[in-house]
Amino acid sequence: SVEAALSRQRDLSEPAKDNIRSRIASTIQSASITDSNLTKDEQQALKRLKNDKNIVILPADKGRVTVIPDDYKLVSFDVKSLFTSIPLQLALQCTGPAIQQSTDALPLPTEDIMDLLNLCLTSTYFQYNGKHYKQLHGTAMGSPVSVVVAEIVMQNIEERALATCRQTIPLWLRYVDDTFTAVHKDEIDAFHNHLNEQNTDIQFTREIEEDGKLPFLDCLYLDRVFDKNNYNTDFIRRNTHRVTDTTETNRDSTSITTTATIPYIKGTSEAIARILQPYNIRVAHRPITTLRHLLTNVKDKDEPNNRQGAI
């Protein structure tokens, strides 16, 4: 990228360009370049996130879209009072296998963890207005373990529901007890009943999109094209001319600046930017390691014998 930027600088002589190349090469040779700016524990955590099918990873590019047919409706399903609706036995039944399947090193045996979890889930005493009470059903709202148990239970319910439903569900996104789904308009009632059949204590309410609008996680999904933004046309015209006039003035008063995009290395990238700044070459930094590189794995690698041109 630096070489491309130098080639576009017509005002620089070849000796000057060679001097810049030499200074940048010396800076890079003296730099301490690391393979990643993440620790080993962070890299292992990212690998586990990539392998977790319950976590949705959406790279910020235009190629990752979900096509919803015209005869489908967006529907939001919400659990009625999730924490106080989870039966104790269901919580223990779902949590036990999840602990056994965990790849993390556990400080205690699974049996001891389950005993402690049972103690936490049954210790639901609280005080109100000078009197002591005990919560008889569900998990405690203020307990930190309730959040983890609720997530494990919801994962179990949604896996069973999606694996056994007769409907085709092209989109299913969930955050705790709120879901954002797409269901055929003639099968919404059937799928809603199917969700409620998974457990009699955990029941779902639903909200169907109206006029192409559906709220989800404090956001409003809009299925429409904005032809007008309701701004006054005179306001838009004035600001458009202002930006155009300012751009033309700056173009006449300053020389053309070339941009070079280089990987960011702390200390080294700043030094290279200082070297190129006097020659009107602006430096744009990019990360060496990105989440897309760490998390996205679109297909398996080919075996050596299956590669093209192998003999």
Image (cartoon, rainbow, N blue to C red):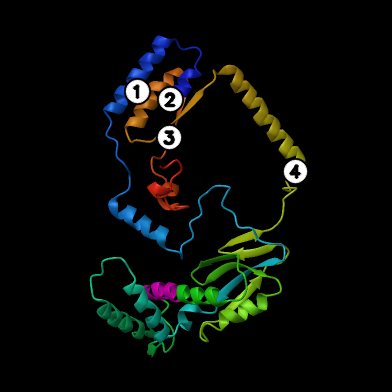
Q: Residues within 10 Å of mark 2 (few under 14, many from 20)?
A: some
Relative to 83, residue 65 above or below: above
Looking at the picture, which amino acid does disc 1 mark?
A: Ile
Looking at the picture, which amino acid does disc 2 mark?
A: Val
Quote the CA–CA distance across marks 4 and 3: 38 Å
Can you say which quadrant of the picture contains the C terminus? top left
> Does label 3 or label 2 sit earlier along the sequence?
2
Classify residue 108 as left or right of residue 252: left
What residue is pinned by disc 4?
A: 232
> Does label 4 or label 3 sit earlier along the sequence?
4
Q: Residues within 10 Å of mark 1 (few under 14, many from 20)?
A: some
Residue shown at 36%/82% (left/top)?
Answer: 121
Residue extent of the magenta highlight: 142-153
Quote the CA–CA distance across marks 3 and 2: 12 Å
Residue 150 in magenta stretch: yes
What residue is pinned by disc 2?
A: 2
Relative to 217, residue 157 above or below: below
Q: Residues within 10 Å of mark 3 (few under 14, many from 20)?
A: some
Residue 18 in magenta stretch: no
Looking at the picture, which amino acid does disc 4 mark?
A: Asn
Q: Which mark is residue 285?
A: 3
Picture quadrant where residue 207 is located:
bottom right
